[in-house]
Amino acid sequence: MSQTQHQMLDVNGIRLSLYTAGPPEGRPVWLLHGFPECWYSWRHQIDALSAAGYRVHIPEMRGYGVTSAPADPAAYDLITLCGDIQAAMDHLGHTQVAMIGHDWGAPVAWHLALLEPERLAVVCGMSVPFGGRPKRPAIEVMRELYQDRFHYMLYFQKPGLAEAEMAEDIPRTMRVMMHGMSGTAGGSTLVQDKPADARWLDDRIDPGVPPAWCPPDAFEVYVQTFENSGFHGPVNWYRNFERNWERTAGLSGQQVTQPALFLIGDRDPVGELEAYTIKKMPSVVPLVEQHVLADCGHWIQGEKPQQVNDLLLAFLHRNYQATTARQN
């Protein structure tokens, strides 16, 4: 992988771990990872973007790795998470950037586009679409639909349970998660037919090795990330649906007006769960360009790196070329 530099930034009340690669004169591109991922999930994009002349910034998001992981779930709402990146951009003197996010990183990127319409020149979301502010918190709907059945997001609402289960055997947790939502998966780890009081991963089959798209050296970075941080921070992201809804009231009805790219795999279970949102997306992101990658699951930037890089670089070339006035 391209040579990276690492620094710790004191921003927004936390210590943020930030990796950087690419020529200093290149225009800034931010890569925001999701759950349960790490900065290294962007390794293929770091190489491609750096080679194309961009200055690439890859944070360990709040709660992950060696970035601070506050205990209070209220410290992980979307506006606060956006504030981490906004403060880091301020620290680095960024006045115009490209913002790219996958999984939970995608909602952060979409909301940064709303909050920073001048600073974010372009935005890309992978695997999670943007449909505007919902009429009510999504967790309320889930509670109604899954009163007697298991849903992992409802399981995550119970303090201490999910993070403890996932930490029991971190390599197994990562293998099950990676395989369970890959393009070759036999069944999703998202929606499972079992009682509401069941545990999450007990009945999932562990193949014993990571999927082919995540070789052992990369897999060890994922494992080390959660050995450093545990899972309480990442799971806390899921405990803010009501708070996110309340704190985004001022953004209700706003469109993402920047040039936008949305990528999703045809075998990503999120595609089925969010089919309505994906269809609705052009009404709230009018300049969006959408692509569905064949034979691809949820971990899109790792499963299909060449296709993702080609689409991403073509989009950036049209809308945000690599060099301009020097930035950090």
Image (tube, rainbow, N blue to C red):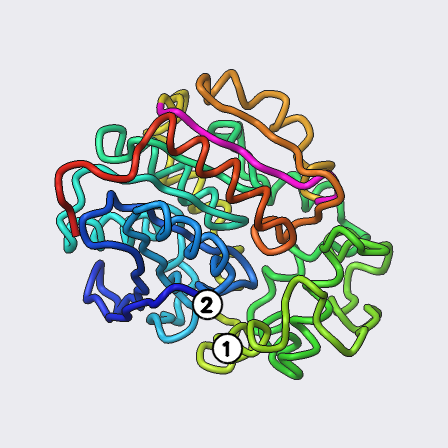
* Left or right: 240, with 290 as reference point: left
Disc 1 designates what residue?
Answer: 230
* Left or right: 26, with 319 as reference point: left
Q: In the picture shown, does residue 257 fall above or below 28?
A: above
Q: Residues within 10 Å of mark 2 (few under 14, many from 20)?
A: many
In magenta, the rendered stretch is: 258-268
Looking at the image, which residue is at 78% across and 59% down?
196
- Amino acid under label 1? Gly
| Quarter of the image where one finds residue 109 | top left
The total number of labels drawn is 2
- Amino acid under label 2? Gly
Q: Nearer the viewer, residue 269 or 46?
A: 46
* Left or right: 236, with 250 as reference point: right
Q: Residues within 10 Å of mark 1 (few under 14, many from 20)?
A: many
Disc 2 designates what residue?
Answer: 233
Q: In the picture shown, does residue 112 fall above or below 303?
A: above
* Left or right: 225, with 122 as reference point: right
The reply to whether dot 1 and dot 2 touch (C-beta < 8 Å) is yes
Looking at the image, which residue is at 61% across and 61% down?
156
Residue 272 in the image: state x and y as whole percent. Answer: 73, 36
Where disc 2 sits, the SS reads: helix
| Quarter of the image where one finds residue 318 | top left
Q: Is residue 305 magenta?
A: no
Looking at the image, which residue is at 81% across and 68% down?
204
Looking at the image, which residue is at 69% across and 37% down?
271
Q: In the picture shown, does residue 264 fall above or below 218?
A: above
